[in-house]
Image: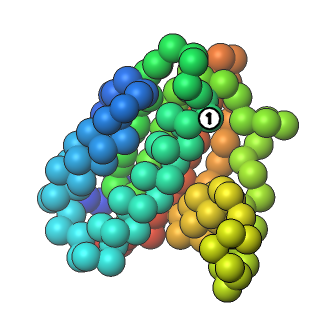
Amino acid sequence: MSLVSNLPAFQISIQSGGMAVRDALKKLMDGLKPLSLDVEEAGTVELVMAEALNNIVEHAYPEGDPDGPINITCSHARDGLHMTVVDNGRAMPDGRTPLGAPVETDVALNDMPEGGFGWFLIKDLAKDVRYDRVESENHLSLRLAVAIG
């Protein structure tokens, strides 16, 4: 990864729970201001990260479990924005991300499937999506092809 940006790498640390995702997204978008992302790029970053972080809050630290840390590292390189998210919540089932297949949405409201949209969006909009369980931590890394120099 060759850095060619005036955006220094930065980290965001939050505790999972109520306002965690909103707080993290605000800090992330503020940190990305030097890139002058256009509306579409900013929306893509925000959508992908909201899905990833909501999954962590909902599944890695489900209701009833104690809240825990979520650490986001962000850097910009020639091939886009590199994001790594680390938490020490519950591991992904089977040690990998869900397939994230598209879901049929042209159905009656009562027949709409629950869930499944998030991983489809993440894998459709991001590149190089990788999940690893390292000891007691979940590591999710991805690349967003935005503000490419």
* Residue type, numbered disc 1: His
Residue at image mark 1: 59
In percent of the image, x 62 and y 63: which residue is there?
Answer: 117
* Furthest residue toward right: 94
Please say whether residue 21 is visible from this viewpoint.
yes
Q: Residues within 10 Å of mark 1 (few under 14, many from 20)?
A: some
From the viewer's perspective, tell me whether residue 29 is left or right of residue 18.
Answer: left
Residue at figure coordinates x 65%, y 48% from the top left: 130
Residue 112 position within the rendered picture, expressed as x and y whole percent measured from the top left? 68, 69
Q: Nearer the viewer, residue 23 or 106?
A: 106
Above or below, 5 against 103 in this view is above
**Pick the front one: 49 or 36:** 49
Q: Which quadrant of the structure image shows residue 133?
A: top right
Q: Name the colour scheme.
A: rainbow
Q: Residue at x 35, y 48 (%)?
A: 75
Quadrant containing the C terminus is bottom left
Q: Position of residue 142 (x, y in %)?
A: 54, 53
Residue that appears at 70% across and 81% down: 107
Instruction: Give x and y (percent) for residue 113.
Output: 71, 64
State how many labels appear.
Answer: 1
Residue 149 visible, this orientation: no
66 or 95, nearer to the observer: 66
Residue nearer the viewer, 126 or 47: 47
Above or below 19: residue 80: below
Could you say whether the residue bearing mark 1 is in a helix, strand or loop?
helix
Q: Quadrant of residue 146?
A: bottom left
Residue 107 in the figure: left or right of residue 50 = right
Residue 83 vs 93, above or below: the answer is below
Q: Residue furthest toward the bottom?
A: 106
